[in-house]
Amino acid sequence: MPPLLRDSALTAAFDHGAGRYDRLVALNPGYHAQLRRSARRLGLTDGGAGRRVLDLGCGTGASTAALAAAFPAAEIVGVDASAGMLERAGAKRWPSRVSFVHAPAEELHRAEVGGPFDAVLAGYLFRNLTDPDAVLRTVHGLLTPGGRLAVHEYALGGRRVDRLVWDAVCRGVILPLGTATGDRDLYRHLWRSVAAFDTAPAFGARLGRAGFERIRVLPLPGWQTGITHTFVGRRADAKPDGAEADGAEADGAEAGGAEAGGAEAGGAEADVARSGRARSGGLGEGGAR
């Protein structure tokens, strides 16, 4: 098997597939609704008034739209390494509070993408990075004290059935569609990158090592349960939280509880949330869709 696409090769593949990307993801049941769910799990109050939010790996703007809907008063900055994906995003209608920057996640400083941000959403990004730990450290540094991170990512839950379902969907749907549209390399990378990436518990632990606390690993509903998760956490040097923070946690728990009603959420994933908090208490491209 050829190696996974990385860096410029992956960016070129997203550039090539950008024109067909929105049509293909529209075939995925719940794709946009699940991005909106992950955006809401950031838990910003007052519609995000006075807040800055970074959409890291914004692609064609699906995650940007999710943030704009969840926080209609927030300033949103979308960043992506793929010029082709950003061209598609920029062609859509956006309010003046939304802007886009062309930059790899690893080179935000060179593009003068500076903090502080009150929240960061990263959708389908981290499994595509050569050094995800370095980017997590960068994100941590860009956040305000108590700033929030939500990672929306394909990360298998760790059960054998999760991998079997993912393989079946890729063989039966994703690869045939990618081949038909001339983007087989990109969608073969999607399949293999998920299999090679952290399991959900392992990525939760990775967030803790990067300095995030109050980590929650929340499954998403539908066929992607056990395959796609929202990972939420906060910058570890947060000041004591007030009513706003309590409300955000309650919102996350409610959303997670409604979806989590199975052995996976009640067992392994609950353990990740607990271990992430304990660990953090002790210490701390393009178009990545």
Image (spheres, rainbow, N blue to C red):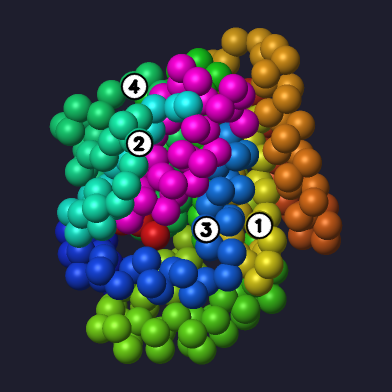
* Amino acid bearing label 4: Gly
Please report the residue visible at 24 percent of the width from the left and 53 percent of the height from the top: 91
What's under tag 3, amino acid-wise? His
What type is the residue that disc 1 sits on? Leu
The span picked out in magenta is 43-72
10 Å crowding of disc 3: few (<14), some (14-19), many (20+): some
User: Tag 1, which secondary structure?
Assistant: loop
Query: Mark 4 vs mark 2: which is more N-terminal?
Result: 2
Q: Quadrant of the N terminus?
A: bottom left
Quick one: label 2 or label 1, which is nearer the N terminus? 2
Residue 278 visible, this angle: no
How many numbered tags mark residues here?
4
| Residue under numbered circle 1 | 220
Reading the image, the residue beneath label 2 is 95
Q: In the image, is residue 52 part of the stretch drawn in magenta?
A: yes
Badge 2 density bin: few <14, some 14–19, many ≥20, Cα 10 Å:
few
